[in-house]
């Protein structure tokens, strides 16, 4: 729409006015007139819908005292500005305030009548351009078009006005339109607000929920953009902060009764509760006097915590209101109506002189109400109109007037306005020639200090977000009172929690969660198909920790650390090895010492009976050497127990390998000697024994043992076992063990022992049926079978055992094989020596 077309549309609408006359207004003459639109009367949605069908129907009924107080706030601010010598000096500010009745249709009419100028005649100049000046020569001030409007309450009507008046660049300063959509400067460049956008209110409520850790909530919203945008902003602000909504219920004015029943049932069935029911209210109802005074409401809604329009004080405003009297304001139809209702009397017909307004002791013409005496006063009246304890919307109106005044002051002020020649600068505006588009530019650059000492400026068309936090608290009378408990300044939340009275009646912050928080040591596991706030707590696995409340994941401990029992911290792994102090170590030590003791006892028995045939048979020297090697085998197992060190790691494998080779070598030589003896008994074989005499036997044992010594020496010199921490086994302990740096060396040691054992087993097996009453080859066969079985089982057990149990397995193999040799080789002989001496004869042993 171009400028000319837009102006013609405005002219046509103003001239039609739908046939309705504008009868009531508040006005004051001035050099500059600012317009005001207030919902001074109530209306219903049904009236709104039928308004265009009934052009002569008066749609407004019932004076709204709160809105009337807001209108008088505008008047007070204008009068205060006119008394200010620094703000708009030399310029008298005037006003024209009309009722728009909350109707978008009515709003358009009264707004266009203000912008167009004369409200009773159509005298707009069609040729007036878009940037036309405010006022025309010869017009009275009351007939001048207003350069800006203050109002309206509704976001809807503000949007409509912006669309209609936008082409004319008329600034609109709203004190109650809080829709976030109005922050869009491209679509609403002429809209300014002294109330924050609802987006900030929703964020404030979200911050409260986060602060109190209310993670399980329900929402009840109006089924319009106001509610939908608010809940969207709330969810965006709480996203990722652990706050979930169990339900979102909507209400609509047209179906409020049925909607209220449905919502009540939903709330009653909900699990989202803060102890009982704690309400977090928006500013739309957090300061409602009607709700606060309702005793039924107090039974279910005490403890409400709400976000409210910020309040402030306006000095001298209470005296200003209480000084109102129809005698002093005979043309104020709104005050007249309020006065008659408040005092229950009639002012009679409107008189031309105030002195004749109140005839004494007369009744009204209709006889229903007495005439007012003239002594009525607002000094002692307590109602919504006179209550200035918490000025909220009224203070927004107050700020709007000051914003308009400062914008006009900036527009009308020039540093070089009066030069030395007294001529006016051509760039300066005058009160009679105000360009609205220039005024709009000055509005965008406003920055001033209010009379209360507050910095005021617009961010786009909005002001910085500031709110009060209020709490509904019970009074002794049973009603509710509004208590200020904190403030919101931008993103800063200032709250006195100790002053809050919750729905439980206590001062302790209640809780509302779907699932209790998971303490450190546990992690959250979401329940399938349920919101994120509903979860189970699962303990972290071993080696993992969570050191924060409500951890989503457990963290694995570093390699050399392990989780404590509570799974809350990583602690250094405990050093673990097979020690003498633990049960397993004590058991193995006892078995080793017992074996060595038994071997010593056998040695003593053999030593005492060394001259008997049983001991002398088959080379007693080898028997004593075998007992000595068995004792070394038992004792070498003790080297494996205890904290591994560099020398213990080297010595234990060498002692093990050499001791067992010495033992098996003795058995091998014994077996060979048995075979040689019986072979020498054959004809022509007598010379055979000279190769198996005592010297040769000792030499053979030394030779076999020397080979193992060479293998061990080479292994230990090139790549010996070293102490090492085994971190591969996942557990709370680190095993300190002797790591085999070379598997080849250990394999050669075991392989050589196995070779000698297998050879001895084979030879003993061949000699088991030799014709002797006592054949030692049988004993060697059994002992070698046990020996080989133990060490064959040792290999897989050694490989698969974890940690220190590797050492235990090797010790067990050493002890088991040593006990097998001791029992099989010497117990039968000791039994005969000690308990069957009659069999310990050469004759008995040589018998076939």
Image (cartoon, rainbow, N blue to C red):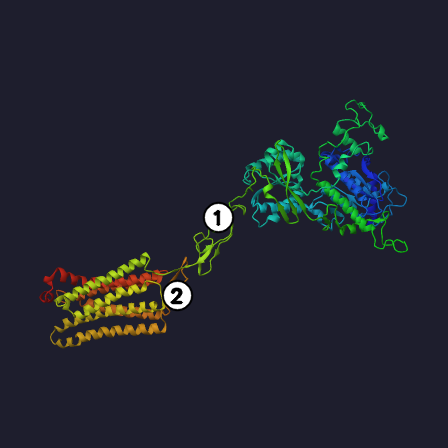
At a point 61% along the width and 49% down the height, the residue shown is: 237
Work out how far the residue at label 1 is from the one at label 2, CA to CA, in angstroms.
Answer: 39 Å
Residue 635 to residue 281: above or below: below
The residue identified by callout 1 is 537
User: Measuring 14% from the left and 72% from the top, which residue is drawn there?
Assistant: 679
Q: How crowded is the residue under tag 2: few (<14 C-alpha within 10 Å), some, or many (20+)?
A: some
Quadrant in which the C terminus appears: bottom left
Count all numbered tags in the image, as a single digit: 2
Secondary structure, mark 1, is strand
Q: Residue furthest left?
A: 843
Percent position (x, y) of residue 195? Answer: 71, 45
Within 10 Å of disc 1 (Cα), the crowding (few <14, some 14-19, many 20+) is some
Residue 633 visible somewhere in the drawing: yes
Residue 9 spot, x, y in % from top left: 82, 44
Quadrant of residue 356 within the rendered picture: top right
Q: In the displayed structure, would residue 642 be above or below residue 126?
A: below
Q: Identify which residue, 515 or 569, lies in the foreground.
A: 569
Q: Nearer the viewer, residue 744 or 446?
A: 446
Q: Which residue is mark 2?
A: 724
Name the spot of residue 163 as percent of width and height, x first.
76, 46
Camera-nearest label, 1 or 2 = 2
Pointer 1 with pointer 2, Cβ within 8 A? no
- Looking at the image, is 647 positioned above or below residue 196? below
Helix or strand or loop: what does disc 2 sit on? strand
Residue 329 lies left or right of residue 467; in this view the side is: right
Which residue shows up at 20% across the image and 74% down it?
698
**Where does residue 573 sit, x and y in percent of width and height?**
42, 59
Instruction: Note whether 110 is above or below 352 in the view shown.
Output: below
Q: Tell whether 727 sits left or right of 618.
A: right
Q: Earlier in the sequence, mark 1 or mark 2?
A: 1
């Amino acid at each position: 729409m171009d400028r000319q077309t837009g102006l013609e549309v405005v002219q046509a609408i103003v001239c039609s006015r739908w046939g309705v006359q504008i009868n009531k207004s508040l006005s004051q003459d001035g050099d500059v007139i600012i317009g005001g639109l207030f919902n001074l009367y109530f209306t219903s949605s049904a009236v709104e819908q039928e308004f265009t069908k009934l052009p002569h129907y008066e749609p407004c009924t019932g004076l709204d005292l709160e809105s009337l107080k807001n209108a008088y706030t505008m008047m007070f601010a204008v009068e205060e500005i006119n008394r200010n010598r620094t703000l708009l000096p030399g310029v008298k500010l005037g006003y024209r305030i009309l009722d728009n009745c909350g109707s978008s249709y009515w709003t358009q009419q009264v707004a266009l009548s203000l912008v167009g100028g004369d409200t009773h005649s159509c005298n707009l100049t069609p040729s007036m351009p878009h940037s036309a000046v405010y006022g025309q020569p010869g017009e009275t001030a009351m007939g001048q078009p207003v350069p800006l409007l203050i109002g309206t309450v509704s976001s809807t009507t503000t949007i409509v006005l912006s669309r209609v008046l936008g082409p004319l660049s008329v600034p609109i300063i709203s004190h109650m339109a809080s829709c976030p959509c109005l922050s869009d400067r491209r679509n609403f460049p002429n809209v300014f607000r002294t109330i924050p956008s609802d987006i900030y209110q929703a964020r404030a409520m979200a911050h409260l929920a986060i602060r109190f850790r209310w993670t399980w909530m329900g929402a009840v919203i109006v089924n319009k953009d106001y509610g939908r945008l608010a809940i969207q902003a709330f969810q965006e602000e709480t996203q990722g902060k652990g706050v979930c909504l169990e339900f979102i219920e909507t209400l609509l004015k047209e179906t409020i009764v049925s909607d209220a029943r449905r919502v009540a049932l939903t709330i009653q069935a909900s699990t989202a509760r803060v102890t009982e029911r704690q309400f977090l209210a928006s500013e739309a109802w957090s300061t409602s006097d009607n709700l606060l005074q309702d005793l039924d409401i107090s039974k279910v809604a005490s403890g409400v915590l709400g976000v409210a329009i910020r309040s402030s004080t306006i000095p001298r405003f209470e005296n200003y209101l209480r000084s109102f009297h129809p005698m002093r304001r005979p043309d104020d139809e709104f005050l007249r109506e309020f006065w008659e209702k408040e005092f229950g009397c009639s002012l009679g017909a409107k008189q031309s002189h105030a002195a004749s307004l109140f005839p004494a002791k007369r009744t009204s013409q209709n006889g229903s109400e007495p005439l007012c005496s003239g002594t009525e006063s607002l000094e002692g009246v307590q109602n919504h109109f006179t209550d200035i304890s918490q000025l909220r919307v009224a203070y927004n109106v107050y700020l709007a007037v000051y914003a308009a005044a400062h914008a006009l002051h900036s527009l009308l002020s020039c540093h070089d306005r009066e030069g030395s020649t007294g001529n006016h600068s051509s760039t300066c505006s005058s009160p009679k020639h105000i360009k609205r588009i220039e005024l709009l530019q000055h509005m965008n650059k406003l920055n001033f200090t209010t009379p209360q000492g507050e910095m005021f400026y617009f961010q786009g068309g909005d002001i910085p977000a500031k709110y009060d936090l209020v709490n509904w608290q019970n009074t002794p009378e049973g009603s509710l009172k509004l208590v200020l408990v904190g403030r919101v300044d931008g993103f800063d939340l200032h709250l006195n929690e100790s002053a809050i009275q919750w729905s439980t009646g206590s001062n302790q912050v209640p809780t509302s969660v779907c699932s209790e928080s998971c303490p450190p040591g546990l992690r959250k596991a979401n329940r399938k198909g349920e919101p994120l706030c509903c979860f189970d707590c699962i303990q972290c696995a071993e080696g993992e920790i969570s050191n924060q409340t409500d951890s989503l994941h457990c963290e694995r401990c570093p390699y050399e650390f392990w989780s404590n029992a509570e799974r809350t911290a990583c602690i250094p792994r405990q050093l673990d090895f097979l020690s003498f102090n633990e049960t397993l170590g004590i058991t193995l030590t006892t078995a080793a010492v017992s074996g060595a003791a038994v071997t010593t006892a056998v040695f003593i028995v053999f030593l005492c009976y060394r001259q008997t045939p049983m001991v002398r048979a088959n080379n007693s020297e080898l028997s004593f050497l075998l007992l000595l090697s068995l004792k070394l085998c038992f004792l070498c197992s003790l080297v494996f127990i205890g904290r591994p060190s560099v020398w213990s790691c080297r010595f234990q494998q060498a002692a093990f390998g050499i001791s067992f080779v010495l033992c098996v070598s003795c058995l091998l030589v014994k077996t060979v000697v048995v075979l040689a003896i019986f072979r020498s008994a054959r004809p022509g074989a007598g010379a055979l024994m000279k190769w198996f005499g005592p010297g040769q036997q000792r030499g053979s044992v030394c030779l076999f043992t020397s080979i193992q010594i060479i293998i061990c020496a080479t292994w230990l010199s090139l790549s010996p076992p070293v102490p090492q921490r085994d971190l591969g086994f996942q557990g709370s302990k680190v095993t300190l063990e002797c790591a085999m740096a070379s598997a080849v060396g250990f394999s050669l040691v075991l392989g050589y022992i196995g070779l000698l054992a297998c050879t001895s087993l084979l030879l003993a097996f061949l000699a088991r049926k030799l014709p002797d009453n006592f054949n030692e080859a049988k004993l060697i066969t059994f002992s070698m079978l046990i020996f080989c079985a133990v060490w064959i089982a040792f290999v897989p057990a050694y490989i698969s055992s974890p940690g220190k149990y590797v050492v235990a397995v090797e010790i067990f193999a050493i002890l088991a094989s040593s006990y097998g040799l001791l029992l099989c080789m010497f117990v039968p002989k000791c039994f005969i020596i000690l308990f069957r001496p009659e069999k310990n004869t050469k004759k008995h042993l040589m018998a076939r």
